[in-house]
Image: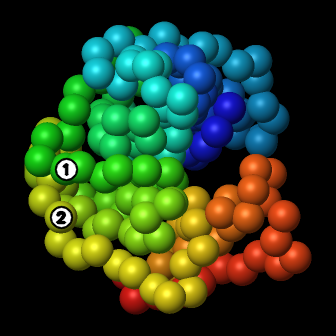
Amino acid sequence: INDVALTKDGAWFTDSAQAKLYFVPVSATGVPGPFTTLALSGPAADTSGEFNLNGIQATPDGKTLVVAHSGNGSLYTVDPANGESATIAGVSVPNVDGIVLQGRRLWAVQNSDNQVTRIRLGPQLTSGVVEEVITSVLFQFPTTAARFGSRLAVVNAKFDTGFPPTADQYEVVVVDG
């Protein structure tokens, strides 16, 4: 299990070794229910890399999931009802890790590249265009991010010190997003 996306109905999780997503429903009172497994089909189901599915986000209505595939350097949409996936064309994000989705704008954290790529997605989420590549001398193998007002809070995992990392301290770097 790698990353998580929250919807009004529960939480979706990626699996970096298998072509599966997991869903844990959460009741209106906050009680988690039994998890279910969603087998993926299409391009997101490729598990030929050492590390595959990683970041995940959901559209506000929960009807589409967006997943990041580290091994392919690609982004895909996934139908949570049947597991069918499709490539988001026009976007290459090598070493993609965590992602942030806000409307049709997506930020893709590229860990060993020490950068975050901001992408403008098309209306149907079938394609995207790179708007900006965000870098900072303070990035040290960033793995995920979150919106912080109009800025982006980026987590340094410091995997460049080993796996698991051996750094003495870790930080969040806030950059203009």
- Tally of marks: 2
- For the residues labelled 2 and 1, say whether their Cβ atoms are less than 8 Å apart: yes
The amino acid type found where label 2 is placed reads Val
Q: Which residue is mark 1?
A: 91
Residue 159 percent across, percent down from the top left: 68, 59
Q: Tell me which residue sits at (35%, 50%) in the image.
A: 94
State which quarter of the image contains the N terminus.
top right
**Up-down relation of residue 44 to residue 2 (above or below):** above
The crowd level at tag 1 (other Cα within 10 Å; few <14, some 14-19, many 20+) is some
Q: For mark 1, give the secondary structure.
A: loop
Q: For mark 2, give the secondary structure.
A: strand
Q: Tell me which residue sits at (64%, 39%) in the image.
A: 2
Along the line of sight, the residue nearer the viewer: 172 or 28: 172
Q: Tell me which residue sits at (12%, 47%) in the image.
A: 90
Along the line of sight, the residue nearer the viewer: 158 or 131: 158
Q: Is residue 79 visible?
A: no
The amino acid type found where label 1 is placed reads Val
Q: Which residue is mark 2?
A: 130
**Up-down relation of residue 165 to residue 45 (above or below):** below
Q: Is residue 91 visible?
A: yes
- Give left or right: position of 138 versus 79: right
Residue 91 percent across, percent down from the top left: 19, 50
Q: Tell me which residue sits at (51%, 54%) in the image.
A: 98
Q: Residue furthest right?
A: 168
